[in-house]
Amino acid sequence: MSTMSGNETPAVPSVPSAGPGSSAPSAPLARRPWALPSAVAAEIDPDHGARAGRSGRRPRRTVRDWLVDFACFFVAVGIGLLGADAVGDNPNVSPGFAEADQIIGALACAAVWLRRRWPVGLAIAMVLVSVVSDTAGGAAAVALFTLAVHRPFRYVGWIGGASICLMPVIYWLRPDADLPFLVAALLGVLINATVIGWGMFVRSRRQLLLSLRDRAIRAENEATLRAEQAQRLARESIAREMHDVLAHRLTLLSVHAGALEFRPDAPRQEIARAAGVIRESAHEALQDLREVIGVLRGGGDGDASGRPQPTLAALETLVAESRDAGMKVALDHRVTEPAAVPAAVGRTAYRIAQEGLTNARKHAPGAEVTVLVSGAPGEGLTLSVRNPPPPGDVPKVPGSGQGLIGLTERATLAGGRIEHGAADDGGFRVDAWLPWDSSPARGADL
């Protein structure tokens, strides 16, 4: 009977299909499906299980299944031969009944080949047959073992319990020639309980192994999903950075190029100044693009390009650049020490101001823009960018509002909030608040 311990598989719940990461735990086993039970092979090889499901049949037996089936058959035959000898030498059994016992036992051994297809039905039949045939004892043991391996405990409890309860009846109908009734009955109960417990142990072990495999697949899938999510967040961050960096420069190019297009008769000085702004903006756009490409290549923040990320201290430079481009900007900077603002908070505030100036330049050219910055450690940083309605007709400039969406995400990730919309005077406003911790700034670490 030892050959049965490692060769049966329980009817386990199917392992959920996994993504690309699921191949690692099952690949070594999938390369040798012939060495696995058919039920396990169907779980590990989804294509094998899918083919069996489409054909409407059970998975085909593997080489290991055939070896186990032959081993179970020979075990049933061996125990049956011992039982046949015992029945032939038992003075309590008539010769005619002994011959019938051997015929029934031979049929029972042949029925062992049906154990995989009908484990419950075969176990019930063997329990009944064992009452009238000692030669069928081996087949009955194999049937009980198969039932314990392939079916839940509710089946094993009823059928196995009935088999154990019938032991005294069997030895009362056919007393053993060598053992007392009580000893023989207890020995039969012990053998049946051992076979059932052995089968339940094999079933639990199979379920444990497959559950561990399932858990490994789930863990690997979760790791893959986390990696994909990290990549998606990185791509979104890079997309926001590219928009924030390049939109400001490209808007300058668009506005001044449009001015040259609609004012070909402008004074020479204005044309030269606009051309200079276009050239300078194109140069800065190329520098910013190199910076973003450096981030992509180096995987860092902004140091890969050699240019530091802008912070709140660079806000005056941004305003001066906008003024040089012809904008009217009034800056009210009430933060006494901009360098003390944490780098992450200052960078977010800079991007908000940059996007506000870019939108004002696109949608309200000629209007004076007011930028107000205030705050202190522990109170937070407040930033406001407002512009009145444009004084005249506004040329159409491409834009879809994605910058404001990106700013909202930036402010939310920084732990702050942002509001934007039409002002009371018909203009546009962008108001933001960002947290400013009262602890010492750690700009170099962010």
Image: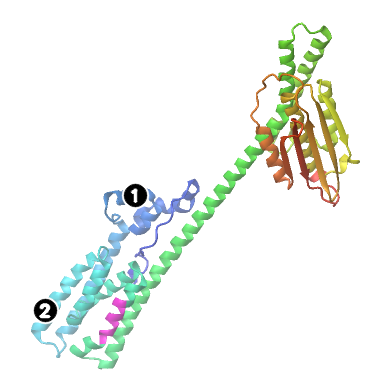
Tag 2: amino acid: Ala
Is disc 2 placed on a helix, strand or loop? helix
Disc with the residue nearer the chain's start (2 vs 1): 1
Which quadrant does the N terminus fall into? bottom left
Q: Which quadrant is home to the C terminus?
A: top right
Give the x, y percent position of residue 317: 85, 29
Camera-side residue of 347 and 442: 347
Q: Position of residue 432 (x, y in %)?
A: 76, 41
Residue 129 found in image quarter: bottom left
Give the dominant element type of the magenta stretch: helix, strand or loop.
helix
Above/below status of 187 relative to 102 = below
Residue 91 appears in which quarter of the rendering? bottom left
For the residues labelled 2 and 1, say whether their Cβ atoms are less than 8 Å apart: no
Mark 1 is on which residue type? Ala
Please give the range of residues in magenta: 158-167
Of all residues, the one furthest to the top in this rendering is 265
Q: Is residue 378 magenta?
A: no
Is residue 163 part of the magenta span, yes or no? yes
* Residue labelled with disc 1: 50
> Looking at the picture, how far across and down is residue 299, in whole percent?
68, 38
**In the figure, 252 relative to 84: above or below?**
above
Question: Is residue 39 left or right of 115 when viewed as pictured?
Answer: right
Can residue 392 be seen in this snapshot?
yes
Quarter of the image holding residue 332?
top right
Q: Which mark is residue 100?
A: 2
The Cα–Cα distance between marks 2 and 1, rounded to whole angstroms, is 46 Å
Nearest to viewer (mark 2 / mark 1): 1
Apparent side of residue 406 relative to residue 172 in the rendered image (left or right): right
Residue at image location 23% in from the left, 65% down from the top: 114
